[in-house]
Image (cartoon, grey):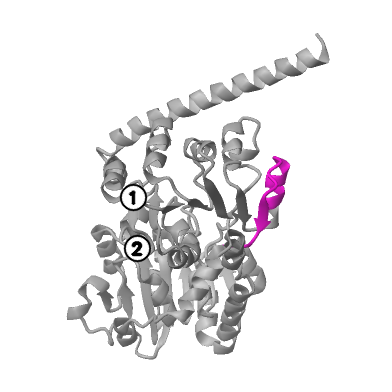
Amino acid sequence: MTLTNEFISKKCILALKERILRFIYNIGIYLANFGLKFGALFNDKLKKGVVGRKATFTILKNNLNKNDKTLWFHCASLGEYEQGLPVFTKLRHQYKDHKIILSFFSPSGYDIRKNTPIADIVIYLPLDTKTNSKRFLDLVNPELTIFVKYDIWPNFLNELKRRHLRAILISAAFRKNHIYFKAYGKLFKNALFAFEHIFTQNEDSKTLLKSIHYQAVTVSGDTRFDRVYSQLEIDNTLNFIEEFKNNQLCVVAGSTWPEGESLFINFINSEASRHVKFIIAPHDIKPERIKNLQERINSKTVLFSEKKSQDLTNSQVYIIDTVGILSKIYSYADIAYVGGAMGHTGLHNTLEPAVFGIPIIIGNNHIKFHEAQALIDNGGMFSISTKNNFNSILNKFICNSDFRIKCGSKNVEYIKKNRGAVIQILNYLGK
């Protein structure tokens, strides 16, 4: 066999493997569709997604016409939406004659932001089949598409590329174990090349992209820093929180899970908690969970849902059984705890409290969160693994105001130093 024939043979084998992988992926999507519909019979969250995706094309048909100029923003869930929001907001202002379509994959993003003012149409992203991607882009035909962080869907992205439509990925964060860098991940790796430019959070992500010969990459940092810093520029006043705090020291526990709540309940029920106010914002606000949490606390406790009929000033614990106001509540905190890392559910947003210049406590399962380790190394955040660790650091923050203020100031300085991703992205887009 000549070298030429050998090269052609290898090329054919690679092409065949790619077709097989694409076939397996597409079959997997159809099986996932069946699984989601079946699971929706027993799970309300899955049901919301199934019903929502079923309505997507009808919503698009009813709200778009062929003469509309559009932008398409896609986020997996609420966290990615918050990450992309500073860019979305700027583009909303600068593309006033365009309709903006915002898509989510997860109900947790769609439910909370379905009425966001930055978009004209908010929808669930249809499942990633070839038919859906063609039908979707026939209707939307975006002048510019922005994906945030991840949620890479090969059929949608390949169809964007086939139609020569502009797309960028922002705040991307890659790790070695991601499928794009595996021998069997060519389908997903190729999907990345549908983006004309990728803005990464860090140098490691850029290096990984270079390893697969993706060159159009810029390390811009994380747009979340711009997002959280903008929180300082808005009115964060919540009269009911002011009434509750009553100028006393206040600890805010945000996005909590049972593991972290147990630590707080033990502390609140002890003598050490006297003269301190506590606000707990659970991640899961189902009535039975809230009731269980409230019943375990010995101090006078008030619920957000019952605030109008309660004595806020003389209550010690405020349980926030609603969503959407935690970022403002953090502005009243003197100390913050952020949930998710005491267990294995994933650490929640630590930058939201950090921007208000307060010290933060988290659990010890935070290895996947670069900013958490950076805040720890910087001296403004503390990782705990036991009840004794928790009690010790919380007592120190409560009793030592100089230490508390010093640690908190390190957090806001870290936020300030890491801003600027939005400017780089907008400069690239020429806006």
Q: If the image is split into quadrants, where does the C terminus sit?
A: bottom right
Residue at (69, 46) in percent of width and height: 208
Residue 28 % position (x, y): 44, 28
175, above or below 354, in the image = above
Whether residue 159 sits left or right of residue 32 in the image: it is right
Say what secondary structure mark 2 lies in: loop
Q: Which residue in the structure is indicated by mark 1?
A: 123
Q: Which residue in the structure is indicated by mark 2?
A: 116
Q: Which residues are magenta?
A: 206-222
Residue at (54, 70) in percent of width and height: 226
* Front residue of 62 and 57: 62
Q: Residue 235 appears in which quarter of the rendering?
A: bottom left
Residue 45 % position (x, y): 30, 47
Label 1 amino acid? Answer: Ile
Q: Which mark is residue 307?
A: none
Residue at (35, 71) in percent of width and height: 325
Label 2 amino acid? Answer: Thr
Residue at (72, 45) in percent of width and height: 210
Q: If the image is split into quadrants, where does the N terminus sit?
A: top right
Q: Earlier in the sequence, mark 2 or mark 1?
A: 2
Residue lying furthest right in this view? 2
Q: Is residue 410 visible?
A: yes
Whether residue 158 sits left or right of residue 4 in the image: it is left
